[in-house]
Amino acid sequence: MAVETAPAKTTTGQKLHRIHVVVNGAAHDVDVEPRTLLVHFLRENLGMTGTHIGCDTTSCGACTVLLNGRAVKSCTLFAVQVDQASIATVEGLEKDGKLHPIQEGFHQEHGLQCGFCTPGMMMTAVGFLATNPAPTELQIREAISGNLCRCTGYVNIVKSIDYAARKLREPAEGKAPDVR
Amino acid sequence: MIPASFEYEVATDVAHAIQLLASSGGEAKVLAGGQSLIPLMKFRLAQPASLIDITRIAGLSGIRENGELQIGALIREADLEKNAIIRQRYPIIADTAAVVADPLVRNMATIGGNLAHADPANDHPATMLALRASVVAQGSKGERVIPIDDFFLDTFTTALRPDEILVEIRVPKPAARSGGAYLKLERKVGDFAIVGVAAVVRLDESGKIAAASIGLTNVGLTAIRARNAEEKLRGQAPDDKALAAAGAAAAAESQPVSDLRGPAEYKRDVVRVLTQRAIRKAVARAKGGN
Amino acid sequence: MSVEIGGIGSSVKRKEDARFIRGKGKYVDDVKLPGMLYLDIARSPYAHARIKSIDTSKALKIPGVAAVITGKDLVPLNLHWMPTLMSDKQMVLPTDTVLYQAQEVAAVVATERYIAADGVAAIEVEYEPLPVVVDPKKALEPGAPVLREDREQKNNHIWHWEVGDKAGTDKAFRDAEVVVKQDLYIPRIHVASIETCGIVASWDKVEGKLTVWMTTQAPHAIRTVIALVAGHLGLAEHKIRVISPDIGGGFGGKVPVYPGYVLAIGASVLTGAPVKWIEDRSENIQADSFARDYHISAELAAKKDGTMQALRVKTIADHGAFDAAANPSKYPAGLFHIITGSYPFQKSFVEVDGAYTNKPPGGIAYRCSFRVTEAAFTIERLVDVLALELKKDPAALRMQNFIKPEAFPYKSALGWEYDSGDYGRALKLAMDTIDYAGLRKEQATKRAKGELMGIGISSFTEIVGAGPSKQFDILGIKMFDSAEIRVHPTGKAMVRLGVKSQGQGHETTFAQIVAEELGLPVGDIAVEEGDTDTAPYGLGTYASRSTPVAGGATAIAARKIREKARLIAAHLLEANPDDVEWKDYKFQVKGVPAKTKTMQEVAFAAYTNHPQGMEAGLEAVDYYDPPNLTYPFGSYICVVDIDRGTGEVKIRRFVAVDDCGTIINPMIVEGQIHGGLTMGLAPALYEQITYDEQGNIQGGNFMDYLLPTAMETPNWETAKTTTPSPHHPIGAKGVGESATVGAPAAIANAVVDALAHLGVRHIDIPITPWKVQQILKANGAAE
Amino acid sequence: MRFEGTLDIAAPRDRVWAFLTDPKQVTTCAPDVQSLDLTDPTHFKVVVKAGVGPIKGTFNMSVEFIDLRAPEHAEVLARGQAPGSAVEMRNTMDLVAAGERTTLRWASDVTVNGMIAQVGARLMQGAADKITQQVFSCIQVKLESPASAGISANPA
């Protein structure tokens, strides 16, 4: 289903570009200014505020989303670059009222405190586990080395990702606990 | 941090990219992974009038071994690191790709961008210097192959003409009994190198070093070759004494400056240490080890 | 403890997680109001300069720019300055002189974030550079340029503060058998919470009501400050609503008022539209309050046998251009005089002098209660220096000197009354956990081979829970805190607090306190904070004060409810109230286990069947004025390996034994310790902000301000002892900051220990590879 | 940062002096001049674009001849800004005549403040050095080219 949103204004005379992008499975056709950063496109144009901004210098990973399945920093990407692409954000993790194992893992293993880095951490983990379903602790640490957390000291984030990895490997045993 | 406005063009093929570049009057920048350029634009330290997105050009992200290794300029660092040919036959390139910035940046950043940006702190330049690579450029006047020694002219400045784009990197096929390694010291994971050293050695049948080439990261206006160090190694057994001499030579010919990554004197000393360690690892690989 | 209800002591999974793991947290930047404008700030490239002119014409020509505000525009409103928490005068926008790089110079308000940024780039300011002073020691020299021309006092000295027995301490030093002295610099660092600061200010002209969503750790205090500062503009406290929504980390950085907040409020009043200001990371690090920047000279007097006798400390505190420290009013150097630490010094004297420099203002905490890390780092380093001087094992020297468990409550030489402690037990547990003896053997073997390995100990004492009203206030407001509990007819409860979580898990832990006190399941208790229209007045969350102060308020408010509930239960049980007791989370007629009433039954009765003559309902409020501070403590042991070629320090193991008294939620406490340790590691090895001679900030963004990643951070190992606070209603002491306070010294001591055989006694933090390498080279110990 | 150098210019000292102290002429050697605005004989404003590779700033410079002792010593203070950054260059030039040739000894003290100093610190030394060298080598080239004789004979 295509969702049309209002064209973005440009007051600086720049040509707007119509982009077609699928976000969490829903198609959007939106006019954007070339300089619109993907993170602002998601937060401002689409109102999806789960993706955060932490640093502006491609250092912290709070803005991490999946671009065609790969974890990237949406503050260092223009929305025009993702024309025709598929984006996954934290808002799309839960499916049919069932938490994604990574969400479950962060809850069960106390992998979050203030929650600000959490969406980026989870998206990085999801992208990573797709390529490495049975990682070692060191591999998990390497995988999240582009995501900064100021609260947790990473120990429980590593455990959370390991929890998700185990859960994803054994889907049959999985039963999402209620965290509502 | 909000970039200034710019025009955006998608190049459909190489010819189109060249045409867009040629008609920009030098005010356009090529956009590949954008992981170096976009941060500069967000600080408004770079304000190009337009960006020419070349990532939709087909055929520039392959890896082939065809007498020599041909790496498409648009291959992402993450793919380079995982590529089977690279891992098995060119581990020094895998070493290098694995330490460029962080895993998320590596999912976007391209090897072509890493070279064409010509930041002396980037990692691939030193490795390509050590590998005696060459760079394939295409422009309005056709294609030319630029030896890597002639490619880096200055900080952020390459031999690419204003209407040329880098399309491929060519690396000579590894000789028998050769090996290479890239070592990087960083303040923390994800940072630019304090110092990086790329070393490639070829051993003769007796196990002596027949040839060595060494590239250094972030100790000069561009990535530089440590030619004196290479000379010191030629014909030597790779023992501690020869390595020490090479390390000392590399340190002497490095030109670091003092900055937040440490005093120049320290960096020079790290060149000495990492040069020895990189050679040692390269020799081990030349002998079939890891 | 009852696992079923999730009371005190159980590792209840966090209630707040549900929204965060779904990306449904509501942070300030997520607030979007109709017609909202965006504010962006032009900042000074100079550290010290006269503003000759500001040309806003080009900015105003940009379509979408609604207004440009300069200092001169604010003068008629008297909003160009504001008081800091230490009652200094900080400029909101300077009218004539900029005093530090990145100081706010003008603000642009526009219809879009991007256009506001364009407006900032179009502002042209002409400056005349003035001499720059970045070194506080030089700032205090006679003849130094006077930075604060607005002050009557024509030098850069802010204040002198001292405590202790000077004459007695001097005498002890004169008579001492051994004196060790160490100068230490604790660099400028920044809390760098991953969420930066921001505000949405919405002025309703018709109602005269101001609503702000703001990244603040202390919403009530902010409301009062706004009313005091902008009261003359018609802002009255009953029509100011401060909402502190989800906060992406605070650590002390979200305590002060920053000019951007004031500008956004002013812009909303001026334009009649809601105005959002969200700072970027560079602004956050470069202009918001810093932490530390203490130049310390410390001396310790002891007997030859190692008995510590006296401590003498002289410090210069660099506050930047304004004294914007967040300290209790009476303590310009915070609680730095906890510096006698875990040791029974007979005599001590501490003096601190504040200095102005051309650097950003501040002096806030960095996940520590008011200058406590400065103190703990100094004493724990100094003890190791003494150990080296006396050639004693640092663990044995500590064990020999610790304040003994039977000495508590213990009155320190500098006037604090420590509530409880058992320091030897914590250190012993840490030594056993890490196999201290085995490590010392390994070190000897390695040292013989030329390998570098070090073991560092830190046995710190914290001081948190500010604080008793006789000593503690901020801008005159006493440092109590509050809780309001309402138990609804169906037995569900709502708890509102004056503190504000920034990730500490209040929605869970405070519910657990109530669950424990009232016997209601933790899931039936909602905790709400951060809205001044609904929450009772409180001083906010910082300095590890939520559990010691608001936790006390919560327990006592719950007990008030329980007392009333007991009367209702007696009524329901048709028993004499004196015969009804609270047992196993129920009311029971003494000696008749069959005759019980649950809190749910009582709650229903409170609204449907309460005794005649009693007020209906089941609610209570408590404003808790703690009788004393609390003194958490711990012993940390760190093992490092050093690369002889590069000087890199690698933490191999780190064991943290903490004692924070009664633990409400062990899972959350452990998480707090992990995070605190990482924020202790950060300044020990990585983070610092420095300035060049022109006052250019170095380390002003995340490319150069080096927050540790998962790769630098070791796998922290934790253990605990429990020594409850005797004066706290539930015996809790607070834990959020202990690890940040205790860890740096353990790491620094480990590195010095690795190099001690080379004659090294001290290395200033952050211990960079080049500092280590320089030592190795100088001693011929490098690869 | 201090940079200095000595140029042996194949042009008489008076002509070198006239070139160096004439805003219209000397700014032909400034990098990428966008506009030039003369205030009075010793003050002018010039907008230049300078940088390395993709890093470029547009600087509004106010230039002042603060010490002119014809034909042997000149001191020029150039101060300017790009958004978020400020730069100051204090140039001294000493001219010694050697027949029809001139020895120009120059020194340039450059300070950079703000964003460029923060973010570009590791590149600043090289960039400033290069730009300064380019300016002075351009001066030499212009003065030694035949066309320049005509320009300097009729100073504006």
Image: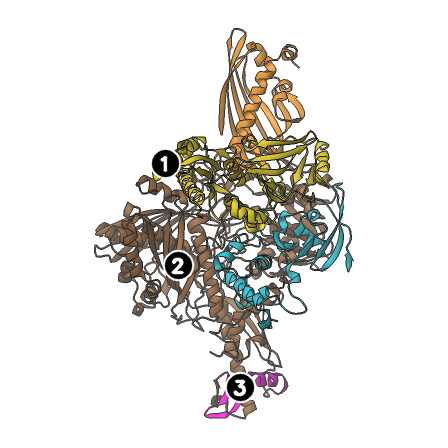
Chain colours: A cyan, B yellow, C brown, D orange
Residue at the extreme top: D99
Q: Residues within 10 Å of mark 2 (few under 14, many from 20)?
A: many
Amino acid type for the residue under numbered disc 2: Phe
Q: Is residue D92 magenta?
A: no
- N-term mark: 3 or 2: 3
Residue at the extreme front: B205
Viewer-proximal residue among C546 and C280 = C280
Q: Is B7 on the left or on the right of C328, as rendered?
A: right
The numbered dot on residue C567 is 3
Q: Which stretch appears magenta?
A: C584-609
Q: Is residue C687 above or below residue D101?
A: below
SS at mark 3?
A: helix
Q: Is C329 on the left or on the right of C397, as rendered?
A: right
Eye-nearest disc, 3 or 1: 1
Viewer-proximal residue among B238 and C684 = B238
The numbered dot on residue C654 is 2
Provide residue D113's location: percent of width, then percent of height: 54, 36
